Image (cartoon, rainbow, N blue to C red):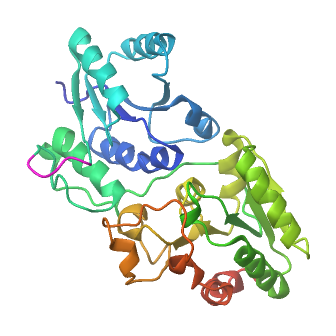
């Protein structure tokens, strides 16, 4: 392989995962400044990057849902003359595709399956660590060893360049992939009241999707929001970076919106309940603080995190109060006065 190979990094995962994968793109850009570096992600997430700049030469939308999808993906990747394909956080369906592609086209294919135990080729394989660090470990193992030490996730936070002007705006991230990761909606309303009482100039934006679940969340928040402190927006993915990037703070659950905010350079405060931040908050905790109650025996009964979709007690999040949060964020809001 040449000193300037054409590289395709693949992360066929969810929205937040695709944002975190940008750290690996930045790392590879630092050691392969003259290479063409492409980033393959799920096709439905691609529009998030339509109006921003990243360290990738091109974002490649991928889909493996049908034979037609396979054909389209194959044709696109073949046109790029790829020398090395490396997949982050392996997906079984994509692995079959890239094994076949590499066999036919003589492109090297490597991957990192985070779920495999120790003994594999990847540095620190099987260790529980920051998600971004695990991505970097895999990229270093197969593409970076000749360039020095293992990169640190703190050196390569995900970044997008978005053209937007800063405003007195706060983003509330109220949704999550499961109920146990969600701070209560009534707490968000109480926090909004506290913010608006002292900092009336701030607009509080709640980005939502058009899904039925988000529509139900919107209805409940609107019912609780007696002071009309919240502004609900249903933006296309391509418009989210400009919306979020203009904000002063992100406050909310550990979800894709949080990762977008951080990549856009917005300070974040995240609520962690069933999942510890060690893996799922791969950022400098001083720049991006979080709320996390530990120890809790119930969190670790079956694994190194709680995988419950629903929970009656919600003790991990219930004991984080709006006043606790306001006391932490007030110094950031005071700076803008």
Q: Is residue 258 visible to the viewer in this orientation of the structure? A: yes
Residue 70 percent across, percent down from the top left? 44, 14
Q: Which residues are magenta?
A: 115-119
Q: Position of residue 104 (x, y in %)?
A: 24, 9
Q: Find the residue positioned furthest to the right.
A: 227
Q: Based on the picture, tell me whether residue 253 belongs to the magenta stretch.
A: no
Residue at image point 32% right, 48% down: 27
Residue 195 sits above or below residue 260 on the image: below
- In the figure, is residue 128 to the left or right of 173? left
Residue 40 location in percent, x, y? Answer: 43, 31
The residue at the point 49 percent across, 16 percent down is 66
Nearest to the observer: residue 10 or residue 128: 128
Nearer to the camera, 55 or 78:
78
Quadrant including the C terminus = bottom right
Q: Main secondary structure of the magenta part?
A: loop
Res 280 quadrant in image: bottom left
- When asked about the image quadrant of residue 3, the answer is top left
In the figure, is residue 134 to the left or right of 57?
left
Q: For the point 49% across and 24% down, which residue is it?
A: 63
Position above or below: 227 against 67:
below
- Report which quarter residue 167 is drawn in: bottom right
User: Against 62, is 156 above or below?
Assistant: below
Q: Position of residue 333 (x, y in %)?
A: 70, 81
Q: From where the camera sits, is residue 163 visible?
A: no
């Amino acid at each position: 392989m040449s000193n300037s190979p054409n590289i395709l990094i693949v992360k066929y995962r969810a929205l937040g995962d695709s944002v975190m994968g940008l750290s690996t793109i930045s790392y590879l850009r630092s050691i392969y400044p003259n290479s063409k570096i492409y980033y393959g992600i799920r096709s439905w997430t691609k529009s998030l990057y339509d109006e921003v700049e990243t360290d990738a030469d091109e974002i490649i939308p991928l889909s493996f849902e049908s034979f037609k999808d396979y054909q389209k993906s194959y044709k696109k990747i073949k046109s790029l003359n790829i020398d090395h394909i490396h997949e982050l956080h392996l997906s079984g369906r994509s692995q079959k595709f890239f094994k076949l592609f590499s066999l036919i086209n003589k492109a090297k294919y490597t991957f990192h399956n985070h779920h495999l135990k120790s003994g594999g080729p990847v540095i620190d394989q099987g260790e529980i660590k920051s998600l971004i660090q695990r991505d970097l470990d895999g990229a270093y193992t197969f593409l970076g060893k000749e360039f020095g030490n293992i990169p640190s996730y703190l050196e390569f936070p995900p970044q997008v360049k978005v053209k937007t002007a800063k405003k007195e705006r706060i983003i509330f991230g109220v949704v999550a992939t499961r109920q146990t990761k969600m701070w209560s909606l009534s707490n968000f309303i109480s926090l909004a009241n506290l913010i608006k009482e002292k900092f009336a100039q701030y607009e509080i934006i709640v980005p939502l999707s058009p899904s039925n679940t988000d529509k139900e969340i919107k209805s409940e928040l609107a019912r609780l929001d007696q002071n009309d402190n919240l502004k609900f927006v249903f933006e296309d993915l391509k418009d989210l970076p400009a919306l979020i990037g203009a904000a002063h703070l992100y406050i909310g659950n550990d979800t894709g919106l949080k990762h977008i905010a951080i990549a856009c350079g917005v300070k974040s405060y995240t609520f962690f309940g069933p999942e510890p931040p060690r893996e799922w908050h791969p950022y400098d905790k001083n720049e991006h603080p979080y709320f996390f109650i530990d120890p809790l025996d119930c969190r670790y009964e079956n694994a190194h995190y709680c995988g419950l979709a629903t929970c009656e007690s919600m003790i991990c999040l219930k004991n984080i109060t709006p006043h606790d949060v306001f006391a932490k964020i007030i110094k950031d809001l005071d700076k803008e006065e």
